[in-house]
Image (spheres, rainbow, N blue to C red):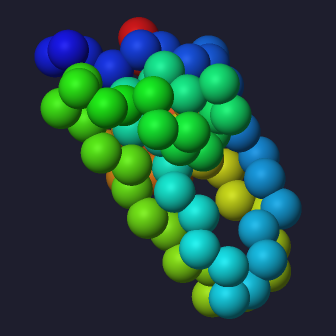
Amino acid sequence: MIEPVRASDKPYVIEVEAGECYFWCACGKSATQPFCDGSHKGTGFKPIKYNATESKKVSFCGCKQSATQPFCDGSHKNS
């Protein structure tokens, strides 16, 4: 698998909790988007770990094309 699967045409806005660890799906195959469920096995992709330092809303990338992964940078508007 060379390119990730486009999971969404918009970001996933998620309320994260301070002190929690999240694993963002980089391959796009997870059934629990935007988070990893292990579906990347055998794809060459690995999830990206995000440690929340404060409780807040975070916009996680859904198109898997962001240059600021795991966060949305608006790339979904260009592809």
Residue 67 occupies quadrant: top left
Res. 64 visible in picture: no
Which residue is pictured at 78% across the width and 53% down the height?
14
Could you say where residue 27 lies in the image, as x and y percent from the top left? 38, 29
Could you say where residue 54 lies in the image, as x and y percent from the top left? 72, 86
Which residue is pictured at 39% across the width and 56% down the height?
48
Left or right: 17 in relation to 73:
right
Quadrant placement of the N terminus: top left
Residue 32 occupies quadrant: top right
Which residue is pictured at 59% across the width and 74% down the height?
21
75 vs 47, nearest the viewer = 47
Left or right: 43 in relation to 71:
left
Could you say where residue 16 lies in the image, as x and y percent from the top left? 77, 68
Res. 1 visible in picture: yes
Vertical placement of 14 versus 45: above or below?
Answer: below
Vertical placement of 58 versus 77: above or below?
Answer: below
Quadrant placement of the C terminus: top left
Which residue is pictured at 65% across the width and 33% down the height?
33
Could you say where residue 51 lies in the image, as x and y percent from the top left? 54, 78
Vertical placement of 21 versus 73: above or below?
Answer: below
Left or right: 13 in relation to 70:
right
**Number of numbered discs on residues:** 0
